Image: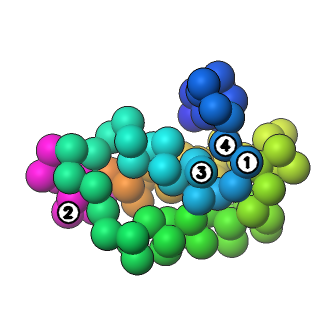
Amino acid sequence: FTKLLLDSKTPPKTTADVVDIFVARMFVVPPAPETRARLAKFLETELGTDDIAQAQSYMEESLRMLMHLILSLPEYQLG
């Protein structure tokens, strides 16, 4: 997942950017803003920072956990 993010047209700078990239790629019906904010906060807590550049070397496992949460959301199931 790290390579997917870093190879994006616009690489993410914050955890909210990461969530936005995954939501854009994975959802037909986007989750509510509150859900997106909770997902970004989860990733920030897991990484210990909101700065993606700082977390590049160790963020893969946290991204996998985030993706698991995303795939478990009811909005994803609607797609």
Whether tag 4 and tag 3 are in contact, CB under 8 A, the answer is yes
Q: What type is the residue that disc 4 sits on?
A: Pro
Q: Which residue is mark 2?
A: 74
Question: Where is residue 9, by image quadrant?
Answer: top right
Res 17 label: 3
Ranked by sequence position, the earlier of labels 2 and 1 is 1
Q: Which residue is mark 4?
A: 12
Closer to the eye: label 2 or 1: 1
Q: Position of residue 77 (x, y in %)?
A: 17, 52
Q: Provide the secondary structure element on which disc 1 rests.
A: loop
The residue positioned 38% from the left and 36% from the top of the image is: 25
| Range covered by the magenta-colored residues | 72-79
Res 13 label: 1
Whether tag 1 and tag 4 are in contact, CB under 8 A, the answer is yes
Which is more toward the observer, 60 or 35?
A: 35
- Distance, label 2 to label 1, CA atoms, is 27 Å
Res 29 label: none
Q: Quadrant for the C terminus, please.
A: top left
Q: What type is the residue that disc 2 sits on?
A: Pro
Whether tag 3 and tag 1 are in contact, CB under 8 A, the answer is yes
Q: What type is the residue that disc 3 sits on?
A: Asp
Label 3 environment density (alpha carbons within 10 Å; few <14, some 14–19, many ≥20): some
